[in-house]
Amino acid sequence: MKKTIFILFLLPLFSFNLHKIHVSLTNIVYKKESKTLQITTRVFIDDIENIINKKYGLKLEFDTEKETSETDKYLKKYFEKNLKITLDNQEITLSYLGKEYDEDIVYVYFEMENIPDFKQIEVKNTVLFDLFDDQQNIIKIKDETTQKTFFLKPNHFKEILTIE
Amino acid sequence: MKTYFSLLLVFAFSLFSFSQQTENKKNDEAHYNVNRFKQLREEVATPNTYHTASGKPGKDYYQQKVDYKMNILLDDDKQRIYGDEIITYHNNSTDDLEYLWVQLDQNMQAPDSKTPDIKADGPSVLYRPKQFTQQFLGKPFDGGFKIEYVKDINGNDLPYVINRTMMRIDLPKPIKAGETYQFKIKWWYNIVDHTLARKRSGYEHFKKDGNNAYIIAQFYPRLAVYNNDEGWQNMQFWGRGEFALEFGDFDVNITTPADHILDGTGHLLNRKEMLTKKQWKRWQKAITSYDKPIVVVTQEEAEKAEKSKATKTKTWKLHADNVRDFAFTSSRKYILDAMGVKISDKTVIAESIYPKEGNPLWGELSTKVVKNTLETYSKELFDYPYHKAISVHAKQQGMEYPMICWNYGRPRPDGTYSKRTRNGMIGVITHEVGHNWFPMIVNSDERQWTWMDEGLNSFTEILAEQKFEKGFPSRGFPHKVVDYMKGDQSRITPIMAQSNNIYNFGMNGYSKPAAGLYMLREVIMGHDLFDKAFSTYAKRWKFKHPTPEDFFRTMEDASAVDLDWFWRGWFFTTWRVDIGVKDVKKFVVTTKPTTRAKKMAAAYGMKASDFGPVLFLVDTDSKDYTPDMEKVKNPAKDIKILKDFIEKNYSPEEQKQLKNTKYFYEIVFEKPGEMPMPIIAEYTFKDGSKLRKQYPAQIWRKNDREVKKLFASDKEIESIKIDPDLLTADINLNNNSWPKKVVDSKIDQFKKKKMKE
């Protein structure tokens, strides 16, 4: 059984390195009125396809005519393992809404309802850390009163935000 | 009548001062001139006779010339390069030089390199055994130049000092202004596996057939630039900020295994001897094939060559004139195809070199993309002056050299490929071949300014890609930099920052400047003025070293469009664009004096009735408004003084020509964002028709946050949309519509879509 080899990339140095930036963006929005927590994560399709296939030993194709519903299934599975949201010391279960492709990016959507107002939110995001040691996951948390951004990396993969 | 008229003039002037007084009450802090439209003087270098005020090279402009004669040996067994060179340095400056600085880029990979030392991120997530051993247990990769000698032309040793990637040669006596000096260097170094070390050159090892493909660059000690802007450009090569290089002529002999296929910068003088008879015939055909590429070294021949390793060697001879660098590629795995491209009355050869792992994608597309790039860039800037452009297939690469570049785009082992791989490949080939213009020929200092070549190239790349395939997912469109620009300010650097210090390198050096140029072309200057100015800049600095000022000045010089506000905002700051419609007020026409008019009359000790026959515009939300004013449906017909005036002064035919203006609005545009931009307004009328109106950026000159426009029309406004084509990188679209339309978040849009299904 041939073991697949991960190739770890150092920060790419090329003249054309646009695509090689290892960054994801996760927007977390809390709507107090409707008690809804919405999460949107943007990642590069190539990267997420790569890690999911490697991790689960598959050959899934994202955003081609050959795509099956298995992509949703494993996307959900991978995110459940790598994106953990804890509100006031209570970890919430992510509810996968779906995904959308936009050129080389995929938007992954989660929406949780009946979420009471909280004082503290802890975000642990290790998406793609098992593929790139220079992966940066940007987290933006927003509710009516607060807006905060922080950056998570392999050696700093969770952060707590206290909302007054 | 006359007295009334002159009184009216007096009132008109006094009205200005009257309104200014009320505004100045708020702000009592003394200040510098912080107007966003002030001319760029403090931020840019003073014009001089090297780089003039118009953006042209001046009468005292000089540049050095450096020629190289090299013998290179590519050792396939040890993955090494051995070389010796004679360097001829032409000191065309007006200064005597006591030392010369020579760049030793391979030293960035030497065991004692400081590049790993400046990484500030702590331990890696995991280590492969090879990495772990190299980094912690034993010997790191033995990279870096091993210098065997540095001698003068007579064989005497020259004293030298190596400061990591820079070597200073201390000359026995200075090279006087105008003099030429020759010296020799002998060296060798270990070639790195570029797919693991992620460098711009090296080899890739193919396990299946046991062969290497070499992409060789930065392989020789070469001179640093000496000019009047930097003195010696001897900033260390840390790995990020790229290269500053002089023009010169190269004569390079490269010895490789006898079964290799090689090509590089310059004319391959002995190509006929190096190819078989059949291959040479195909080459002759290919370079005059203008409609499609012709394969010169076939996949069959390449696969045969892969099966054994020649023990004999052969020596390739290349000669290049007026290039700033030299690079080459070599492997026994290579397939080669080419075609001829007509650029004005000359033929340029478009060539692609790739192992079978690049097929079918490379055989299908690479040379065609090279051709398209040559044609579109030549049209936009200036005719490609060299005789050939090569695209070389290399894993995960994207790097440029004169006449040759490395590009990624590998299909899966079964030959299939995703849309993304295909589009990525088209993009990278276009981009890298495009670099021949910026910086290979318009030779800016990449060590200092990444954007001058990357930004300008990324913009021109959009034009080439859209020509290749309309609707191609090009980067660099203004709306694509919005997320970056509205991000955390502590992670954003202005474009005008030293290459090694910028956050988010790709966005900062490539996309944001490209988006800026796109806005200049589409919105601020228009195609004709932009294209003429852009190509003027390129032509002025062809085969020279421009500075940012030369670019900024030339774009204005050739167009008469004032751009200082734009350069300051887009390049020197991180100002963001946010323009919207704040309010729309309806006005009616009346002869009843308004409160404002009465106040003005009182200020002059007069009464409103002293104005004579005048008209007033009344805000329907104001106290002056009375419902009976709505009776005026058409002022030209319903207001007596106006009707009388028209009938008295216009003939019946002329009256027919007059517009039927009935609707008056005061539109308040707001600019919460710092960056001035033209206001692109699209008015939709109740009858369904639309009108586009663009107000120049100068509208914000004296009112940085809010402006009011009186809009008079014969049709009633239904809605207004600001920047409907998303051309201004507006970071907030929630104020772009009137009546106000809040743009749904992506997730809410997705939910709505799903509910419809």
Image (cartoon, rainbow, N blue to C red):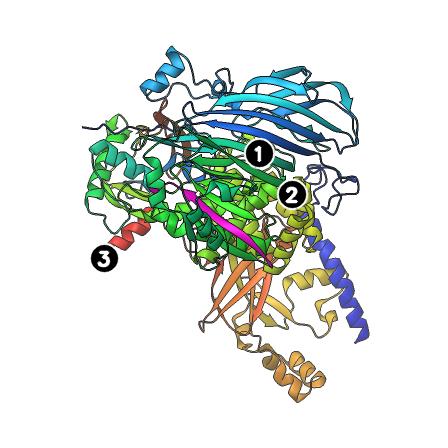
Q: CA distance from mark 1 to mark 3?
A: 65 Å
Find the magenta span and give its range.
B345-357
Q: Chain of mark 2?
A: B
Residue with the mark numbered 3: B757
The secondary structure type at the circle numbered 1 is strand
Quadrant that contains the C terminus of chain B: bottom left
Q: Residue B267 at x, y = what percent?
A: 56, 43
As shown in the figure, which amino acid type bears the numbered disc 2?
A: Lys
- Describe residue B443's horizontal placement relative to residue B479 as left or right: right
- Describe residue A36's horizontal placement relative to residue A161 as left or right: left
The secondary structure type at the circle numbered 3 is loop
As shown in the figure, which amino acid type bears the numbered disc 3?
A: Glu
Q: Quadrant of residue B639?
A: bottom right
Q: How many marks?
A: 3
Q: CA distance from mark 3 to mark 2?
A: 55 Å
Q: Main secondary structure of the magenta part?
A: strand
Q: Earlier in the sequence, mark 1 or mark 3?
A: 1
Q: Residue B469 at x, y = what percent?
A: 43, 57
